[in-house]
Amino acid sequence: MKDMDADSYITEDGRRIGGVVMEMRNITLRFGGVVAIKDISFDIREGEIRAIIGPNGAGKSSMLNVISGFYNPQEGEVYYKGEKRPPMKPYQVAQQGIARTFQNIALFEGMTVLDNVMTGRIRQMSSGLLAQAIWKGKAEREEVKNREQVEKIIDFLEIQHIRKTPVGRLPYGLKKRVELARALAAEPSILLLDEPMAGMNVEEKEDMSRFILDVNDEFGSTIALIEHDMGVVMDLSDRVVVMDYGQKIGDGTPDEVRNNQAVIDAYLGVAHD
Amino acid sequence: MAQSSQATEGLGSIPALLQRNAGQFGARPAYREKEFGIWQCWTWAEAEKEIEALALGLLNLGVNEGDFIAVIGRNRPHFYWSMVAAQSVGAIPVPLYQDAAAEEMAYVLEHCGARFAVVEDQEQVDKVIDVQDQLHQFEHMIYVDPRGLRKYDHHKLHTFTGVQDQGRAAYWELIEDLKARREKLEYDSICVMLYTSGTTGKPKGVVLSNRNIIEASRSSAEFDNLSRDEEVLAYLPMAWVGDFIFSIGQAYWCGFCVNCPESVETMQIDLREIGPTYYFAPPRVFETQLTNVMIRMEDAGRLKKWLFDRFMEHARKVGPAILDGKQVGAWDRMKYALGNLLIYGPLKDTLGFGRVRVGYTAGEAIGPEIFEFYRSLGINLKQLYGQTEASVFITLQPDGEVRNDTVGVAAPGVELRIDESGEVFYRSAGTFEYYYKNPESTKSTKDSEGWVATGDAGFFEEGSGHLRIIDRAKDVGKMADGKLFAPKYVENKLKFYPNILESVVFGNQRDACTAFINIDLNAVGNWAERNNIGYASYQELAGHPKVLEMIQSHVEEVNRSLADDPMLSHCQVHRFLVLHKELDADDGEMTRTRKVRRGVIAEKFEDLVGALYDGSTEIYTTTEVTYEDGRKGAISATLEIRNAKVVPVEGEKKVAAE
């Protein structure tokens, strides 16, 4: 791997984008005879907001699932921090510092917001079951420390007023925010967001966009997100990968992608022969 | 009285009171704020250090004596410190409504010529940057929450803690200057400038001296025996005079602790955790809480509901009498005590009123049912009448003489008189100095002997001597036949229904009264849910025939009750419509303190007013709306106009017969 700092650069709005942290090389993913992803390569740089877009069924979620280790591709390699990643279970990927949210929200509905976000800290807890039950010494100290971190995230995402509310009682937009909070609580080095704006109204989308930008700015998180709302993506991201029918049809800055004929065709709909 | 003379000598300013508090009981809590889920506390000694560091930082930035410093943010200790730090360096704090649009802020910032502003976060920074070009004198901005501001140009932008750090670093250079400036402060120097929201025209800057604030705080604190053990929750806008008096004036005079909520949304939770002993809220807050309680009781189990209804009935019967210390039978007292154990106590606790010793409401008339509800629970809720120009207090209700329809007797040290036209005038130590850069208004409001016109029409009740306010003097008009027209009186009667959030009554120089009505989305939405009425938007709900029917029944009930009042029976509402949008301060239809602006409304909805009087049954209209970020849009709707049944009045019948 090259020296990471060598090709880092500063964006127009003053953020520092580092070297490559994750690289996909010639990924192909099949389900039986169906090819979901066909020979795709791209990379994610440290500190950037990287979007994967494409029409419905383009294979975006499959791609995210490959990154998060939920699917193992039949062909191709994933490089993480310069090393080739062997096939892994999702929890092992999580332990490597990759956290995600889900398209159709996967929270513990019966638990409070606070408890849900606390579960994001699991990686930072090392005391055993017995120690937790007795809750003296290390277990207590650990919880206090973790709670402090969680409270900072709650404050950051402005969900103080629902801290003690069971998640099941919350409206959709807030649940999405709670999921983001839980993913953030893991202090990930890469944050994967699966359609963070799906099903939101304009105002909620604006709020979510601001939170994503603030998270990137404040915590320096590398963010990879999937979204099909083009407008939002173009405003948020530093670089965009465009997929269609399992293939990569474009890759570059929002402006480059916007002017790419293949992308325009895919979005405006051109007959595929 | 000893205290009074002492005040004139040693304690002539807020910074002086701070020094006293830090010296005499420095270890007691002065401020609490919930942050990261925990109540963070600052003692008086710590608060003094924070304020001193900030004051030094302000000197370091070049604040001059007599400068104006704008303070824009929600209730947080930092902003209270900012105001006292500004005073300490001889500057004048000007708190602004933080939800005001950029243009409104521009007017105030330009008018006072503020060179500095202490603001909360990115939202406020953006607003001020937006209008900065219009502000010639403006120089530096200090912000508290750095989120999202990292990449901004920091030439004229400073972090709150950064300014404090610089102040601490320059301690030895600047402390003598700070001490000298602090000592120069006198009873007559300016304490604060507050902009009145202004139901008509541009806001006016009310200049209040240390004498105004400290005297008003001292006498009102004595009136209610406030001590340093009180707990208050600071949640009302900092730009409003009430918050300045409660959270700075009285808090510094008495030395009690000011608690700041975690965020606007958590206010109810924080209220419950703090359990204030001294509490102020406008009628709207009490109204909303009562509505919420009632909605939740509808969902309660049958036994609970039965117990609640039973005991509330009993409370209404004897609760207020027990609170006023009147004679109540032993059996009734026992039943009340049982109710307290089962219902009243837990309910008060849930509402956050478990420890309230003195509670006030003011600003608008409060519905009799709402007022009675809280008093019957044993909460000592009282009314006061006041305004910015008086440093709040004009009249207060003494314990044991509390009523829904009066505003009490003259506050200590206040003289009252009523002129021929019925307008109320007062004179007191709290009376403001002048309107900033507006000698004409000063002259027309405050005469050479110090009497101030309140702009309200009222009279003293015979027997009790309590003051009763009828309406804004300028709103009181005449109907076409020359009879008295008091819109607010009718509007209040309408607003006492939980389903009606706001109403505007027309009728000046007309034959009959008509009304605009705003539904309360909370209450009506809940009602709709219960009755299986589907709706997709506010507009749709507001225009639903069933909703109109319900509102009509309320209007007709009001008409019946008006018919019993010989003075105002002709003010019955003949026709009404339910508005398709909520009246909003962002659209200029209400003030930031939520008072309706009649002139603006009549002009903006001219077509609708016309339709109320030309007999049509529906009208199509398009209205411009302003979104929170200042962008504009338009909504249109077809509104139904309904006729309400009117009770014929004796006198009118005779006229008709003649």
Image: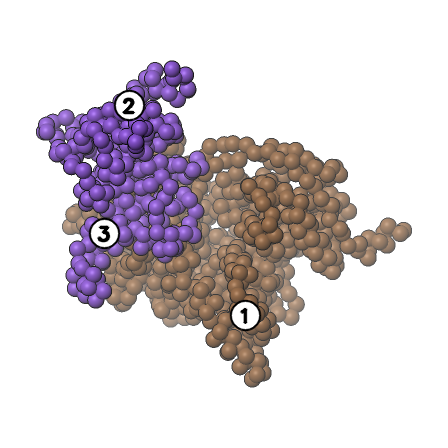
The residue located at (34%, 63%) in the rendering is: B257
Horizontal arrangement in the rendering, residue A202 relative to residue A81 (left or right): right
Residue B421 visible here: no
- Given this view, does label 1 or label 2 mark the residue nearer the observer? 2
Q: Do residues under tags 2 and 3 come within 8 Å of each other at their CB atoms?
A: no
In the rendered image, the vertical position of residue A249 relative to residue B172, given as above or below: above
Q: Residues within 10 Å of mark 2 (few under 14, many from 20)?
A: many
Q: Quadrant of residue A46?
A: top left
Residue B307 image-quadrant placement? bottom right
Colour of chain B in the image: brown
Q: Which residue is mark 2?
A: A248
Query: Do marks 1 and 2 both belong to one polypeptide chain?
Result: no
Q: Residues within 10 Å of mark 1 (few under 14, many from 20)?
A: few
C-alpha gap between disc 2 and disc 3: 35 Å
Q: Which residue is mark 1?
A: B303
Give yes or no for contact between labels 1 and 2 (Cβ–Cβ under 8 Å).
Answer: no
Residue B379 appears left or right of B188: right
Question: Which residue position is annotated with label 3?
Answer: A122
Q: Which chain is purple?
A: A
Against A155, residue B606 (above or below) is above
Q: Amino acid at mark 3?
A: Ile
The residue at the point 57 percent across, 43 percent down is B535
